[in-house]
Image (spheres, rainbow, N blue to C red):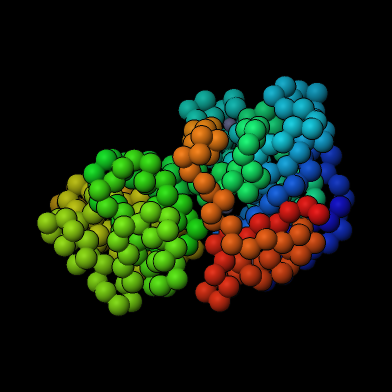
Amino acid sequence: MRAMVYHGPGNKSWEEVPDPTIIDDTDAVVRVDTVTICGTDLHILKGDVPAVTDGRILGHEAVGTVTEIGAGVKNVKPGDRVLVSCITACGRCRYCRDQAYGQCRGGGGWILGHRIDGTQAEQVRVPFADNSTYPVPPGVSDEQVLMLADILPTSYEVGVLNGGVRPGDTVAVVGAGPIGLAAILAARLLSPGHVVAIDLADSRLDAARNFGADIVVNNGQQDPVARVNDLTDGLGADVAIEAVGVPETFELCTRLIRPGGRVANVGVHGKPAPLHLEDLWIKNVTITTGLVDTYSTPTLLRLVAAGQIDPARFVTHRFALADFPAAYDVFTRPGDTGALKVVLTRA
Ligand SMILES: [Zn+2]
Ligand SMILES: [Zn+2]
């Protein structure tokens, strides 16, 4: 088969590799029908994720069809259409028993396209298939469900739920890329008073309005702290969601929140960010971090199936699998291309 293979920082290629096979009796092999590229893949290609080594097939999000199962797999069978989640779960370790699948110690967690070969391929081996795949409900499209492989549960769990968003809250979302937009969409599920999107690009702020932000601030032109304080009687946001992953945006989040407020960091950080405890210690703030656990995936699937959310709105560009290098090129230059999520489909 062919796959997108990582060959060290800055190097990747769409090339011929051996077909995956069942290794453990809890594995399934899934034919990839629809797949996407994540911002995390770009971090890997920059060399920010040293656990990813030369020869690794990239990708941790897919929708596909089961072609083969190990003897121990009970929940899926060949022919089933499934979501392959970014998080794999052994189902037995302490963390899995606590629904914290992202921290699985039994061989799962974020392993696809990281510690084992991933989904940017014609086929993928999925370990612990019973706990790591989700049947796609009838009437739900591949593109809709594909966004539940990573960005929607990540933004919902690590941003909105860790941030404790409640009805009436003023929620500031810093960064209006795919993760920030998903956080805006997910925050709306909890009836906030205001959702304020903050970004340096007007095109992304336009997208933020479409995804449910009622106020947008270009922080290259306007002071976001002053704008949020105006909205909140000078107090600040109840919740600030960090959706970029650079020191400046994390620091901005800590300045946006009110006393007693909550900063939920979603961004993947590659270097230290300043924490001004000299200002924050007296303000009773809560700061959370996290890798997605995907415990919310069944809930999100029900919301999609019921028509309450339509995650296919993230898809801006479509390619055939063989055009993977072109899709990476488009996704790497969102400022020029307007890309939010690019989707590749089997011919
Ligand atoms: Zn991802
Ligand atoms: Zn586990």
Q: Residue at x 48, y 43 (%)?
A: 309
- The residue nearer to you, when weighing 43 against 275, is 43
**Residue 106 percent across, percent down from the top left:** 62, 32
- Ligand 2 shown in quarter: top right
**Residue 215 percent across, percent down from the top left:** 30, 61
Whether residue 339 sits left or right of residue 320 in the image: it is left
Q: Residue furthest left?
A: 233
- Asked if 346 appears above or below 220 in the picture, the reply is above
The answer to which image quadrant residue 247 occupies is bottom left
Q: Residue at x 75, y 46 (%)?
A: 32
- The residue nearer to you, when weighing 39 against 269, is 39
**Residue 98 percent across, percent down from the top left:** 48, 28
Q: Specify whether residue 261 is in view.
A: yes
- Asked if 111 appears above or below 90 in the picture, the reply is below
Q: Residue at x 56, y 76 (%)?
A: 336
* Image mark count: 0
- The residue nearer to you, when weighing 168 against 47, is 168
Q: Specify whether residue 289 is in view.
A: no
**Residue 240 percent across, percent down from the top left:** 31, 54
Q: Quadrant of the C terminus?
A: bottom right
Q: Residue at x 59, y 62 (%)?
A: 316
